[in-house]
Every structure is written in C-alpha cells, then in structure tokens.
Image (cartoon, rainbow, N blue to C red):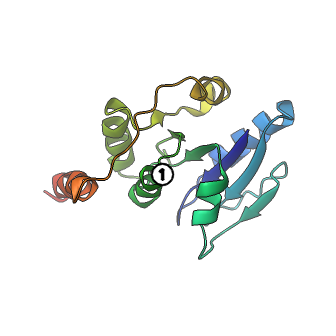
Amino acid sequence: MKLFITVGTSSFDPLFRRMDDILQERADFEAIGQIGTGRYKPIRFTKIFRFTRNIDKYYAWADLIISHGGAGTIYDILRFNKKAIVIPNSMVVEEHQVELVTVLHKLGYIMMGDLDKLPDQIDASSTYDFKPYISKPGKIQCILDKYIRGIIG
C-alpha cells in the first residue's frame, strides 16, 4: 500500500515517529512524507521533503493519505477523493483541528485517526466506507467558512 503522510506547513513529529515504527513492521507499505517544519526526519520512508510546489502528484500517487487536521490539507484530500486517516495535531494550541476532523468524519469523508490505534486504522481503511466527496459549487467553501466564522466568533 502506498502511503502519503503530510502535515502541510506545520510540524507533527509524533506522527512521523509512529509511522517509522509501523513501517518497521510492515514491508508491504511504501511511504512518502511531507514533514513541513518538523525536526524529526523519518528513516523508513522512500522519500521525505519539507515543501514542494507539486504536492498534487503525491496525493495522486497514494492509496491512502495520513494527515494532520489542517484545513488546507483536508481540502486537498477531498479534492482528490482520497481515502484518508486524519489525526488532529495535539501540538496545535487551538482545538480547531479536532472540531474540523470530527465534522468531516461524521459526514463520512475521512477516518478520524489516533496515533495509538494507527496500525489497525490503516488496515481498516481498505474496507472503511469512505463517502466520496462530490464538489458542488461552494459547498466545501461554505463548510470551511462556517467553521472559521465559528472560531473567530
């Protein structure tokens, strides 16, 4: 299975450490990681990078995306209609990632991930009933706008 692990412009070193542990046990996984500003450099990934102008090719390549809960990254996942496990980043001070990921999980677009359960969640992703995202004019923008306005007040 081809995995793309991405954290956008942030850092989420615990996710990459956990993935290194998982990859040690699973030779059937190939992983590419976009580590953002993280300090930890994974050692069991096929490729790692901080940033790229052509991230779309990695979304297209992957069978499964494993990501933090950033709105921009989630939008890309939905845009590509990819299976995804999204783990809210506990290193982020605000709780906005938890709220956004919870809503999209309840709608069936993504799996809400947990670092402790990640190996089982990766296995379960192959049979998980992901709801395909069908872009309607302004729908995702309305969801994100409503969400952001709720945060700002």
Seen in the picture, residue 94 relative to 50 is either above or below; the reply is above
Q: In percent of the image, x 59 and y 27: which residue is there?
A: 121
Question: Quarter of the image holding residue 117?
Answer: top right
Q: Which residue is mark 1?
A: 77
> Which quadrant of the rendered structure holds the N terminus?
top right
Q: Is residue 134 left or right of residue 55?
A: left
Residue 89 in percent (x, y) is at 49, 47
Q: How many marks?
A: 1
Q: On the rendered structure, is 146 left or right of 130?
A: left
- What's the residue at 34%, 47% (across, down)? 134
Identify the residue shown where x is 22% and y is 59%: 137
- Circle 1 SS class: helix
In percent of width and height, residue 128 lies at: 52, 25
Residue at 73% from the left image edge and 57% from the top image edge: 40
> Which residue, as the protein is rendered here, is positioned at the far bottom?
53
Judged left or right of residue 149, residue 107 is: right
Q: Quadrant of residue 30?
A: top right
Callout 1: few (<14), some (14-19), or many (20+) C-alpha neighbours within 10 Å? many
Identified by mark 1, the residue type is Ile
Q: Is residue 100 above or below residue 9?
A: above
Q: From this view, report whether residue 28 is shown above or below residue 61.
A: above
Measured as percent of width and height from the top left, residue 85 is found at 53, 38
**Which quadrant of the figure contains the C terminus?**
bottom left
Name the spot of residue 60 as percent of width and height, x first.
Answer: 60, 56
Q: Residue furthest left?
A: 153
Q: Is residue 50 above or below residue 115?
A: below
Q: Nearer the viewer, residue 116 or 71?
A: 71
